[in-house]
């Protein structure tokens, strides 16, 4: 009981000090520097203490000073990020045909399907536009031999989205398949991609063989990068038919 009494006495002493500091207009952060308890405890102890107008004005002023300092630091770090961003962009030389081919292979390796027909899914218009030109430049696949399947969110205008992607890629509207509309409350992520997500697919006779040509080129890249590459049968096992 004596030990418990001492703990209780100390508790009330700390609480009393915190409340007195608050009554003098100290902020919770300032009290925290003088009282060894958590900030949430200080807030609980002092929540019913009314501050005078001058005390409130002082705290608002301090918050303003803090926010001003935060904004200065934010601007500083943003300028530094911009500096390194543009430094990085200037470090890349003009891309020749070989580099464009490799860039397309790497994108397909990361984002493309490894089954049946060549297709790649992405929401970045720049990626889709580049891959349309890549298929044409390196495999003679014209936009009219490509189809698009859109993934949209409820509230997006399907016809407007189709028009946008058609104008961007040169793919006729007749080549757009039925869009998939993600319903609200279905567990899908809430962040709406403004232009939707595109699945760009090569259609037509021989597209499966084109897929293996692309996969073979990717294998060649892997052989050069890590001295290891998948074999045709590795990809064949992924197909729904043999």
Image: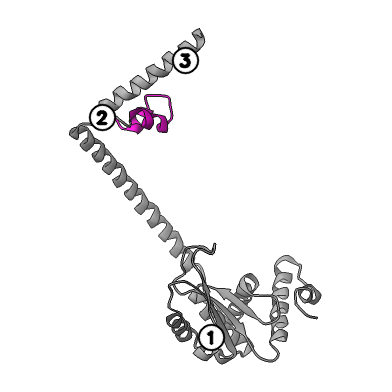
The residue to which callout 1 is attached is 176
- Identify which residue, 214 or 49, lies in the foreground: 49
**Dot 3: few (<14), some (14–19), or many (≥20) neighbours within 10 Å?**
few
Secondary structure state at the residue bearing disc 3: helix
Real-space CA distance between mark 2 and mark 3, rounded to the nearest whole angstrom: 28 Å
Real-space CA distance between mark 1 and mark 2, rounded to the nearest whole angstrom: 65 Å
Residue segment shown in magenta: 25-46
- Identify which residue, 215 or 4, lies in the foreground: 4
Where is the C terminus found, in terms of image quarters? bottom right
How many marks overall?
A: 3
- Identify which residue, 137 or 68, lies in the foreground: 68
Query: Which residue in the rendered view is the most extreme toward the top?
Result: 2
Q: In which quarter of the image is residue 149?
A: bottom right
The residue to which callout 2 is attached is 25
In the rendered structure, are the residues bearing label 1 and label 2 in contact, judged by CB atoms less than 8 Å apart? Answer: no
**Dot 1: few (<14), some (14–19), or many (≥20) neighbours within 10 Å?**
some
């Amino acid at each position: 009981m004596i030990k418990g009494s001492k703990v209780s006495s100390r508790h009330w002493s700390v609480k009393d000090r915190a409340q007195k500091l608050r009554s003098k207009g100290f902020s919770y952060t300032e009290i925290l520097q003088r009282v060894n308890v958590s900030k949430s405890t200080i807030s609980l102890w002092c929540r019913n203490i009314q501050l005078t107008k001058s005390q409130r004005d002082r705290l608002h002023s301090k918050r303003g000073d803090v926010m001003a300092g935060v904004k200065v630091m934010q601007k500083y770090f943003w300028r530094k990020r911009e500096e390194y961003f543009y430094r990085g962009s200037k470090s890349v030389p003009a891309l020749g045909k070989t580099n464009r081919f490799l860039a397309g292979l790497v994108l397909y390796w990361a984002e493309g399907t490894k089954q049946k027909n060549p297709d790649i899914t992405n929401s970045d218009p720049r990626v889709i536009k580049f891959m349309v030109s890549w298929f044409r430049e390196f495999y003679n696949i014209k936009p009219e031999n490509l189809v698009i399947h859109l993934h949209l969110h409820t509230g997006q205008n399907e016809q407007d989205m189709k028009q946008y992607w058609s104008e961007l890629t040169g793919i006729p509207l007749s080549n757009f398949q039925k869009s998939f509309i993600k319903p609200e409350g279905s567990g899908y992520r809430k962040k709406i991609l403004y232009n939707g997500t595109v699945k760009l697919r090569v259609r037509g006779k021989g597209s499966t063989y084109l897929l293996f040509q692309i996969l073979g080129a990717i294998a060649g890249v892997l052989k050069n990068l890590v001295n290891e590459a998948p074999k045709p049968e590795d990809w064949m096992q992924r197909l729904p038919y043999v």
